[in-house]
Amino acid sequence: MTATDRTEPGTPDVAASGGRSVAGARPSGADAEPGGRPDLTEVGPGTLGGELLRRYWHPVTGASELAEAGVKPLRLLGEDLVLYRDRGGAYGLLGRHCPHRRADLSYGWVEDRGLRCSYHGWCFDEAGRCIAQPFEDAVGENARFKEAVRQRAYRVEAKAGLLFAYLGPEPAPLVPTWEPFTWPDGFIQVAFSEVACNWLQCQDNSIDPVHFEWLHDTWPDRQRGSYERAAPRHLRLAFDEFEFGFTYRRVREDLDETSELWTIGRTCLWPNALFTGDHFEWRVPIDDETTLSVGWFFDPVPREARPYRQERIPSWTSPVTDPASGRFVTSHVMNQDFVAWLGQGTTTDRSEEHLSRSDRGVVLMRRRMREEAEAVAAGGDPKGLVRDPERNRCIELPIVGRSRLLEGPTLAEKREQLDRARARYGGPFAFLAGQPAEVQKAYEEAMGC
Ligand code: FES
Ligand SMILES: [Fe+2]
């Protein structure tokens, strides 16, 4: 049997409906990245994938990391950059190497305005203008030289406890105000992990409903040596495209068609995120071979603890590898995803895949990604850009359990939920290992348990 035979579509248990060009999609190895075509896995300037991704804002760090003036080196979309907040409060994102004689600006310091290079004191503002050249300024004979020097500079904006960066052309779209960013009475935290593989295989996972049954439901039992329980099987899948990505919907043997997992579904958020209602997971390319996993988590505080106002949104870094064993961490939900992505290789060889009916969403997403990338290469705008400030006051997304997220649990329900999490994950946070003690404490105080 060939790969194509095995992935023939059209069976009634896999539906693809609505949206653009999803009908008749053909899950087949031919939809992967055959040799000879430009590859969406490349993220640098001028590449097909890189130019598409440059049309969107990407979260790069927690706003709390630059709550005060400071400097942080970072790499994004294959570019070495330096992020800073000056003493006047302005954010800047500049090319890493000073345009004078290439010193590393991440070893510079911030001034009331701009970032100063520690080698000879040249200073740059957030637009990349050179605003001081101390020796040239002192001798006064070359005043116009400053104007000829321009450092690469990109936009930065703070939103929802994150700093977002935009590396694309002007006019920049708006940083989307996704609906959960506007919700009150929740404890929010952001967590980062550096995952040593290409971003696209991480994003394939954002439209892969069946993996939940195995990676997050069955495997944890097996890790504990338990073979007694069978995770509920997936019986039916559907994928729908909408303005900001795709939704995937499922019927499992423990859920019928009245479940919101079927009537609403989860969201593969364009172009590089998963959205599940209470959290976002962005897969931000650092370069072709490394991805920054950015998790944003909203947890409604119990009704008895309201109103609640969070003073500071904490951000922290979660480990991918257990230093004691040298093996990947396998205990928490997103760590399990990292294990899967890393196991696929640095950039998975898609010519070796055998895509099946469960991969129909992956095929649709890759196809749309290619079409959007080609639209950008032809000079157009890709899907999902937000440019209308009025609309951007709050952008609604498909949300399973919206009313419960807004109303919050009772204190008793929350206690029960946290007891289950503590038993299973060794702490109240299920998604990532290594939550710092002070974040856990702030969370437990907010929840009142
Ligand atoms: S290298 Fe930066 S001021 Fe000289
Ligand atoms: Fe997962």
Image (cartoon, helix red, strand yellow):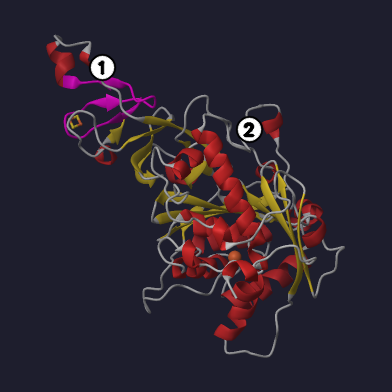
Please give the range of residues in magenta.
111-134
Q: Which mark is residue 378?
A: none
Q: Which quarter of the rendering shows the N terminus? A: bottom right
Q: Is residue 200 something one can see in this rendering?
A: yes
| Ligand 1: image quarter | top left
Query: Based on the displayed image, in which of its 4 quarters is residue 325 positioned?
Result: bottom left
Q: Which quarter of the rendering shows the C terminus? A: bottom right
Q: Mark 2: few, some, or many residues within 10 Å (few <14, many ≥20)?
A: some
Query: Based on the displayed image, in which of its 4 quarters is residue 102 positioned?
Result: top left
User: Is residue 22 found inside the magenta-colored segment of the image?
Assistant: no
**Residue occupying the point 29% across, 38% down:** 96
The image shows residue 106 at horizontal and vertical percentages of 29, 41
Q: Is residue 427 above or below residue 306?
A: below
In the image, what residue type sits under mark 1?
Answer: Ala
Look at the numbered disc 2 and say if its residue's Cβ is closer than 8 Å to ligand 2. no
The image shows residue 200 at horizontal and vertical percentages of 50, 55
Nearer to the camera, 367 or 183: 367
**Residue occupying the point 42% across, 46% down:** 43
The answer to whether the residue labelled 1 contacts the one labelled 2, judged by CB atoms less than 8 Å apart, is no
Q: Is residue 40 above or below residue 410?
A: above
Earlier in the chain: of badge 1 and badge 2, it is 1
Which residue is denoted by mark 1 in the rendering?
A: 148
Instruction: From the viewer's perspective, tell me whether residue 171 is left or right of residue 79.
Output: right
In the image, what residue type sits under mark 2?
Answer: Val
Which residue is denoted by mark 2 in the rendering?
A: 386
